[in-house]
Structures are given as C-alpha cells and as structure tokens.
Image (cartoon, rainbow, N blue to C red):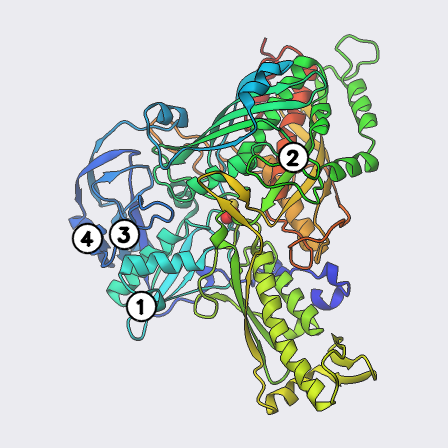
Amino acid sequence: MIDPLKKLKDKKKLANIDAIGHVTGKSTYVDDIPTMQGTLFIKIFDSPVAHGKIKTVDFSEAEQMPGVVKIFSKKDIPGENQIGGIIQDEPLLADDEVHFRGQAILLIVAESEVEAEEALEKIKIDIEELPAIVDPKEAFLKGQFLSNSRTFQLGDSKKAFESATYIFEGSADSGGQEHLYLETQGAYAYPMEHGSIKIHSSTQGPTQVQKAIARVLGVGMNKVEVDVTRIGGGFGGKEDQANPFAAMTALVAWVLKKPAKCILHRMEDMRMTGKRHPYRSDYKIGLDKNLKIVAYEAAFFQNGGAAADLSPAVLERTLFHATNSYFIPNVVLQAHCCKTNLPPNTAFRGFGGPQGMFVIEAAIDHAARILNVNASDIQQNNLLKDGDEFPYGQIVEDGEAKNSWNELGEKYDIEKIRTSINSYNLPTGQAGNKNTFSKKGMALMPICFGISFTNTMMNHARALVHIYTDGTVGVSTGAIEMGQGVNTKMVQVAAREFGIAPELIKLETTNTTRVANTSPSAASATADLNGKALLDACQQIKNRLIKMIQEVYQLEESAPIIFKNEKITIAKNGKEIPWHQVVTDAFSKRINLSAKGHYATPRINFNKETGKGHPFAYHVYGTALFTATVDCLRGIYEIDEVHIVHDVGETINELVDLGQIEGGLVQGIGWMTMEEIIFNQKGKLLSNALSTYKIPDIYAAPKTINTSFLPLRADNLAIYKSKAVGEPPLMYGIGAYFAIRNAVHAFNPNANFEYVSPITPERVLMALYCK
Ligand code: MOS
C-alpha cells in the first residue's frame, strides 16, 4: 500500500492522514465501536405535531413488548431537564407542551434496536394541537422572538439616502440547508467507576456535550469523559446539536448502569435536528451617480425554530457580514431572531454570514439591472480598502478584497468571457444566433469573512504533547477531526517544531480528560487556536531540550540550535545529535518530556451593547467568477466554470486547503441552487429524505473549478500564516445564483422574479416564461 506520508515529500502537499482509512472504510465512527455485552439501544419517540399540549401519553403496552427494558420520560431525569446553551429554553425531553415536530418526548430502551423500534409503534399519545408558525415574518408580527433583536449602525444612513442619486428597495429570501453529514447524530455511553461515565459522541463540541450531560445527570463535569476519534462530517450541525443525543444516551447508561447507544437513522436525523436558518430580509440601497454605495439598510428575519440553540450568535454573524466585501459608509442593519415551530435551527458553515451576504448581493444586482450596468461594476467600485471601517467598528488592515479581485482579472480575461457570453446569447432571431433555447450567464462573487469566534471568550485553546522515550510523539488537542483535515495540520505543526517526520507523530483522540474546557471545532478557527496551543506546547519542550544541550556543550544562551531532519544541530560547530539521542538524554536527566500548551487570540474584543470593537483576528478574502448555462426549455442548468482567487495567507497544506475550498464552494452552490428544505404549513418536513432533498453530486458540481491562492502580502495571526479556510469558500456559492439569474434574463429580459433562493429548476422555468 502506498503511504501518503512517504509518497508526498513536499510538506505543503502532505495528504490527509485519514485518507487511506476513509477510502478503505477503515476509519472508525461512533457506530463502528464494537458494542460491549449488555449494550442497550435507544429509540426516540418524537412529537407528531409542530405545536401542542400533551394531554396523555400511554406507553403501558410498549413497556410490555419483548426486549424493552425501560421507557424514559422527563420524570426519569436525575438532574435538570434543560440543554439550552445560550438561552435556557430547551428541555431534553418534552414538558407538557411540544414546540416542533421531531421534538423528543420519550426514550424507548430495549435490548436490540429492532425491539425498540417495534415498541415505539405501540405508544399512544393524545395531543391538543395548537396553531403552528413556520414563517419568520409571521413570528415577527406576532411578537414571537427567541432573543433580543440586534442593530449594527455606521454613519447616518437617513441623511445619506436623502442625497443618494439612486435608491432601490426590495426583499431577498434564502432557504435552509440540511447538514447531511455522512455520519448521523449518535453516541455510545457506558458507566465507569466512582459514579462516572464515559461517552463517545459524534460532536464538534466535546466540552458542550460534557456540560450538557453533567447538567442532565446532576453531576460534576469531572464525572463525564467525552471521547471523539473523528466525526463523519459536522458542517455546524454537531456544534450544539450533538448534545441532546449524547445526553439521552448518557441518561440511559447512567440510570440503568449499562452501556447504551443511540444512533439516528437518516430520516430521524433530518426530522429531529435543526438546519441552516432560512432568512427573509428587506433591503434598501442608495448609490451616488458614480455607483458608489452611499447607504444601505437591511432588516433580517431569521427563522430560528422552536428554541434558541445558537441562533442569537448566528444572527450576530449575519450582521457582521451583511456588507460583505464592500465599504458602505452609512449603514443600519437590524436582525430579528424569530421563534417558529420548526426544529431549532443551528450553526451551518458560514454561521449566518452567507444569509447576510446574499442580501447585499441581491441589492447590488437589483441596482445594476435597473441602471443597466454590470453588477460587477458596482461590486468592484465599492470593494474594501485598508483604513475602511466595518459597520462593527473594526478597521480594514491588510485587506485583500481588491487584490483578489484584481488578481482574478489578471488571470482570466473577464471582459473576454463577458463578450463570448454575450455573443452566445445573441437575441433570438438575430443573425448568427444558434442558441435560442440555451443561454449563459456570468457573475462575480467577492467574499470577506471574519476569523474568530464572535464571542471573544471562546477564542482560546489547549494542547497536550508527550514525547515518548523512543522519540515518538503523542499529540492531543481540542480540535475535532470532521473530515476537514485539522489533524493533518496538527501533525504538521508538531513535525515542523521538532524537525521530525510526520510518521513519528500520533494524533490522539479528542478527549475532555486530556484537553479540557475546549471551544467547539467551529468558526473556521480550529487549526488556528489548537495549532497555536500545540505550538506553545512543542516550544516549551523544545526550550527544555535546548537548555539541556546548551549546558551539556557549554554553549552561551543565544547559540542557535536547529531542529531538523530528526537531528538537533548546533549551528556554531555543526555538531549533530540525533533526535532519539536528545530525547533519551533528556529523560535520563529527568527532564519533563510532556507539556500543556495554551493559546488565546490577542487583540480581539467586541462590545455587544455598542456593537463595536475588533472582533476578528483577521479576515479571509477571495473572489470567484462563475459562468452557467441554462436550458431554456426545461429550466435546468449547469455551472460551467468557476475561477477562484482565494486568500489562504501562506498555506501549510495545499491539498487540505484546496479540499476545503472546493468542498465549501460546492456546498454553497447546493444551498443557493438545488437544496430545498420544505416544511408544510403545519410544520411537517416534506423534504425528509434523499429522495426529496437533493444535494449536489459530481454531475451537479461545476465542470471546471480553477483555484489559485493569492500570494501572502502581510503577516497575520493564523497558524504559520496559513489562514482559516473552513467556512469562507461556501459563500462563493452565492455567485452561482446570480450567474443562473443572468442567463435567465438573457432569455427573458423582462423576467421579474423575486430574489428567492434556492434557484431551483422549477423557479428558473417559471422565470423564463414569466412576464
Ligand atoms: Mo461552524 S457553522 O462555526 O460549527
């Protein structure tokens, strides 16, 4: 077998250390952990209505079914029946009222999953149905909120609108998105000695899981050990929403003193868990005669679902990114966290940012269409430059908005692409037209995304490093490997610091006992925070080794000592000591070969009251160019080409970063074009399986994706200057929406269709023939 670590000598091309395990199916996930004898299986009885009062639940018959051990209700919870994170509004098991379809009411515990499923059928529930709200604007009008509304403000938009040459108003709505991680939610728990419990959870946030379990069981966090080898995708869906399933599993294991397991089936997962927040939004944009945006106002109505979950934080990030890559001097942004009877919506790659960016892009498109200019002219004319102020008070430093835009223009002849599209699209009947029922569109999409948790206190991390006496190294961090390749980057950090081969380093599971009080792997910040904590740990040990060498060889304190190629070299005299030798010597001199590292992002701050501060360590920028072809008979379309110039800083791993950029792009295209979450008026999820919910496959992916990395121009706070890459590329996907829209307008210039996403083939077909 080819070992990718050996094969790829170039460190920037170190293959994901999980690659072989993944393609051979050997990587283990929660459901792959061999079950212990006596393991019990859990099925969740969830609410069949979106809103109602539970009058009676009768599970006497279910309890008598073969194999059934116990049926849990909220009465069986020894601690608090509460798992709310930001706001305490979410019971683990339903109280007397249910607030969404899919809300957990009872847990059926049986000796096998099949027996639990059969017992589930025998439960009789009588619910008095109450009216359900599924639309955020309706919730707004009825005063139904999950948290306080928020406003970000800069300059004086009222005055600016008075002097604006052009003003456009409209609305733009974006849909939800199913996370569709390959591994569904699940956990496996077992009791340990002294009243403690160990749990394997498919979570992005092991500490959040630990907290939720401690709370539900009424025990200290020190009694709960959470262990995660890796997870099969998260995308934000397991930042908070692994908690309930872990807490249910722990509850059963704890009360019955037996191992217990709960793994959701796909349709259960889709029905019970929250998704990307659908938003409805209103905008007003003002431009001067030179197409400078002088004022922008927007109101965002977030569909939060039935409990707050992470919605208030997601809402805030919508405000942070509502002006995307543009400088707008006069801005009022308002956002409302609306309570509806849907499963609580949650983190999803971009965390509210994409929803905000879609609206400003719609506003620009609107202006461009009426003024008969290219949207890209308005975009380009308003790109951020150094010294500009974001609506939240941070000043642009080392901005790459213009650089990425210009570099894209240098690499690809944008005007030539535009000309060729225009000639392809020659009006029907015009000489030379061969494409009566096929039209092309193009769009540019700049992005700007702030890196750091917007909740400043979450921006710190720890790591634990052991060098064993044979010179091999064990690394534990708080990072969760979810397919994004963070463990590979962690291997690179330790390898680089110690100057040893990646093969000598093992990335341990993420475990709350080894690395405590972690922030979830989220906000694109995982490699930065954990990488820098790891760097600190490695450097602590290195410094001890350096001190030892200086003493042994009687060197002055400043004598340079180099760690490279499994050797430690004393620069002055060229003396080389093998890595293994140094480690053995250090151990025999009773030097500590272990260290705990810590990192807290410097400089950042944000005042939630004033809405001002310097919340982000840095920003990630980029620009993408899209071309699309629409079949004007059928309404179907293809994304032909995407050219991207992306700001990776100075990448430490090209393959991993490219994977994130392409994956994020395609997931963003999916959100904008084909992934359509549909709830009916009674809050029932209709797109409840992969037969009714389409995600992009290889055929729906762009035919060509060209990604180039913007050269590093300035230092930054990323790990080895290799900027965060998880979320930002998703927002390129917004460009696909506008490319398709422009193709539709080429066919039907009078198409008057709303800014609603996803732009499904059905919507395209309607627009092609609307008047
Ligand atoms: Mo991610 S959307 O910050 O879990």
Instruction: Using a 10 Å C-alpha cutoff, classify the residue at mark 1 as few (fewer than 14 neighbours), some (14 to 19) or many (20 or more).
Output: few
Identify the amino acid type marked 2: Ser
Which badge, 4 or 3, comes first in the chain's sequence?
Answer: 4
Question: Could you say whether the residue bearing mark 2 is in a helix, strand or loop?
Answer: loop
Identify the amino acid type marked 3: Leu
Which badge, 2 or 4, comes first in the chain's sequence?
Answer: 4
Residue position for label 3: 107
Q: Point out which mark residue 325 bears.
A: 2
Which badge, 1 or 4, comes first in the chain's sequence?
Answer: 1
Depicted 469 relative to depicted 39: above or below:
below
- Residue at image point 59% right, 13% down: 752
With 391 as the anchor, is 386 left or right in this view? right
Alpha carbon distance from label 1 to label 3: 18 Å
Instruction: Using a 10 Å C-alpha cutoff, classify the residue at mark 4 as few (fewer than 14 neighbours), some (14 to 19) or many (20 or more).
Output: few
> In this view of the protein, which residue sits in the foreground, 98 or 81?
81
Residue position for label 1: 38
Residue position for label 4: 75
- Residue at image point 15% right, 50% down: 60
Image coords of residue 34 (percent x, y): 43, 67
